[in-house]
Structures are given as C-alpha cells and as structure tokens.
Image (cartoon, helix red, strand yellow):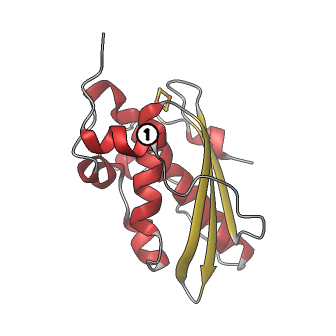
Amino acid sequence: MAMDYSEKVMEHFAHPHNVGVIEDADGVGEVGNAKCGDIMKMYLKIKDGIIEDVKFQTFGCASAIATSSMATDLIKGKPVEDALKLTNQAVVEALDGLPAVKVHCSVLAEQAIKAALADYYKRQGIENDISKCADCENGCCGHDHGAEEA
Ligand code: FES
C-alpha cells in the first residue's frame, strides 16, 4: 500500500540536507529504533553554545531520512538549549505531517540529537540526563533507551 507522504517529506527524502560525518565533532550520538531496528548517527560541531554544524548518517527508512534532514535544518545555527527542546512532534509538523504508522521513525532523529548533546556535555565534564525521550513523559514511546547506552 502506498504511503501518503507530504511533499515536504518527499523533498527531504529525495534530497536530504546535512548528510555525512563531522570528523572533529564535539558531540556524537548513535541510537537505534526498537520498533524497526534502524539506526541513526548524529554529529554536532558546537562553538560558544551554538550548533555551528550538524550532520547525520542513517540506516533508516524514508521517514527517518526526511525527519533527520528537517531536524538538522531546525537546529543548525541555534543555541544548544533550543536543540534540547526540539521534539519529534515539532519536526513532524515542520514536514506537514507523517503517516501515523511512521511517526515512530521521527523519534530516531530527536533521540540522536539528544544523545549527541549528552555526549557533548559529557566531554565538557557536565553531568546530564538529557538522553531521555521527551515522549516518555507522556507515556512511553516504545523507544529502547537501553540501546543508547554505550
Ligand atoms: Fe525504521 Fe522508519 S521504519 S526508522
């Protein structure tokens, strides 16, 4: 059955932004999606509390690619605090929606960004508890947080 994807999703899937690796990244996060087994790696370059550059790699589906592309666009050039507040719902909205069965894919991008920020703080010697799914505050999203532990 064909999925009903928005034009923005198709655009970001066909021409994803910010794909790649940052060799000298200040924070790297890798997460797996417990529901499908797909994985996502996120790299952040941070200077003076601003996300100067962000890149991602994924073995994920079209929705994971599109949401990562949009999520990285949304945090690039923004303060770390803003990136921490980014939710998968905000990314889905920016893409004009996702089919309901694909919403879990958008969690991968949010979680990878949070994991990369957690790594950034850890490298700075700052204790943090941010590698945690925002959705879980309203009932668990099904994400396997255990999979994020290095
Ligand atoms: Fe795995 Fe979409 S089905 S991320």
Instruction: Name the side, left or right, on which 134 lies relative to 27.
Output: left
Quadrant showing the N terminus: top left
Residue at mark 1: 13
Instruction: Name the side, left or right, on which 46 lies relative to 100.
Output: right
- Image location of residue 62, percent across then percent down: 45, 32
Q: Quadrant of residue 24?
A: bottom right
Q: Is residue 108 above or below residue 78?
A: above
Q: Is residue 128 above or below residue 66?
A: below
Q: Amino acid at mark 1?
A: Phe
- Image location of residue 132, percent across then percent down: 50, 53
Q: Is mark 1 within 8 Å of ligand 1?
A: no
Q: Is residue 38 above or below residue 70?
A: above
The residue nearer to you, when weighing 13 against 24, is 13
* Residue 139 seen from this side: no
Residue under the image location 24 percent in, 25 percent down: 4
* Dot 1: element: helix
Residue under the image location 53 percent in, 24 percent down: 36
View extreme (right): residue: 23
- Image location of residue 19, percent across then percent down: 59, 52
- Image location of residue 69, percent across then percent down: 46, 51
Q: Quadrant of residue 78?
A: bottom left
Instruction: Name the side, left or right, on which 77 lies relative to 38.
Output: left
* Residue 117 seen from this side: yes
View extreme (bottom): residue: 48
